[in-house]
Image (cartoon, helix red, strand yellow):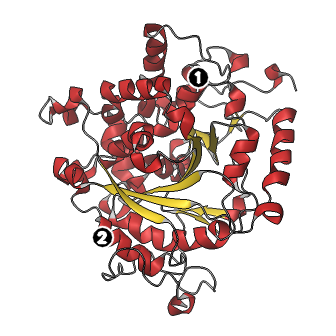
Amino acid sequence: MPLASRLGFAASLAPLASALLRPQVRSEANAVPFRNRTNPDDLLRRFGSTSHSGELDDYDTWLDGHAADLDARCTECVVVEPEDEEQEMHALAEEKCSILVSGRGKALENGAIVYLVTRPMDLNRLKDSLPRLWYYLLRHWQYDVKVFVPGQSLRELDPESFGTSPSIQHVNDTLAQYSGLPVDYNIEVVPFDLEFPKVLADTNGEWKQRMNGCAQAVSEAGSVSYMHMNQFFTKVMYEHPALAQYRYYLRLDADFSFVKTVKEDPFCMMRFTGRKFVWQKRKGIHDPRCSDGLWEWFESYRDQNDLAAGKDEIFWGENGAHVNYVGFATMGDLNFFRSERVRKLAHAINEDGRIYLNRWSDQTYYVLLLALFEEHTKVGDMGFNWPKDSWCHKCEFPDTDRPPFSSVPLNSPLAPPLGVFGGPGVHDWGKYN
């Protein structure tokens, strides 16, 4: 299919830099510029009370839920149709990686599954998502699991953000009781640390007064854990020694659950398709303030470092800063993210400070980072391609959920102390039914 017939952008995202070389955002009607719509700040005043604070843990998802109030029905629809070659490669990989061929309990590739737990609600959500991960994926391909939690020095550095974060002991105790994993399963709770960028650390906290509207929306009660998360997923995670031995990672949010069997090993699929990054959901952003200045930063970095123009002609440009690879389920090639060129860029963008001041997201960072260094085919347009009815984001599972599925309510008490992970490892499916 000719490239020109596949591409374009709706005017609601940004001015067209090159209409035939940008992804199309389909709309049912001609959209007016975002600035003329309901302001996200107005929505926060109307809906963002403390009773909705749980939703605000993911600002983009929260805005998705109120898209009708924003008159922004179409930001879901970043559409670049996959080329025939990509579809054929994906089909061949499915044959190689199918559960019917390879699902015998052994990991096919050198990969690890990654979770980030910084709040009590994250740990509660793992009670439902981890048993489902085991039942629908890991019992067929047993990949290591890493659960990252704030380290002690980070808790001391920013108690407003991490003062209530579950400890390593607490997470281990809860996993031992609720994870449903076999007793000897290789799951590790790992501390991580980070620091504020120097450009902010030197202001004695004054920088918080300079946050734009997007950043303020996710800095409730002085916490900037959301921005710390973006530093973690743009830089810190890739430098952490806990992942040093692996080639691939699969990042899953604690509130992401599989609800049907995964039919192909995702790590195997990534190797056979040759991709550097994989997503399950690609969308436009609702609030353009969340990427204010991001494209200009990337363009300036390219010029200052005498780099070639971006290799991905579809997403390299101003409009790429208005696209997200949604973070609840993504996968990456650690060789790419640990490369010198990427680590240098990651360090520079984190030192800039606007990951905190403007809430530049890892989800949009990935779009422009990969567009700068890799051809479009290294990410592609198919993603994981998991059927919509096979997974669930931010679902609450009822107590009556039948076995063998986990049914621990999100508000159930955390596990009592059981020592380090290595408890019974057998989920009592009937206990909650």
| Left or right relative to 417: residue 181 | right
**Between residues 299 and 54, which one lies in front from this camera angle?**
299
For the C terminus, the quadrant is bottom right
Residue at position x 30%, y 61% from top? 50
| Of residues 229 and 42, the one drawn nearer to the viewer in this rendering | 229
Count neighbours of disc 2 (C-alpha within 10 A) and say few if under 14, some if 14 to 19, many if 20 or more.
Answer: some
Residue 13 in view of the camera:
no
Q: What residue type is labelled 2?
A: Gln
Q: Residue 99, percent across and down? A: 78, 63
Q: Where is residue 30 in the image (x, y as percent from the top left)?
A: 67, 30
As drawn, which residue projects farthest toward the left?
204
In terms of image quadrants, where is residue 20?
A: top right
* Secondary structure of residue under mark 2: helix
Q: What residue type is labelled 1?
A: Phe
Residue at left offset 46%, top offset 85%: 424
Residue tagged by mark 2?
169
Asked whether, in this view, residue 178 is left or right of residue 314, the answer is left
Q: Residue at x 52, y 88 (%)?
A: 428
- Residue behind mark 1: 373
Query: Residue at 75% of width from left, 65% of height from top?
Result: 103
Location of residue 260 in the rendering, given as x and y in whole percent from the top left corner: 70, 69
Mark 1, Cα crowd under 10 Å, few <14 / some 14-19 / many 20+, is some
Q: In this view, does 280 lie to the left or right of 428?
A: right
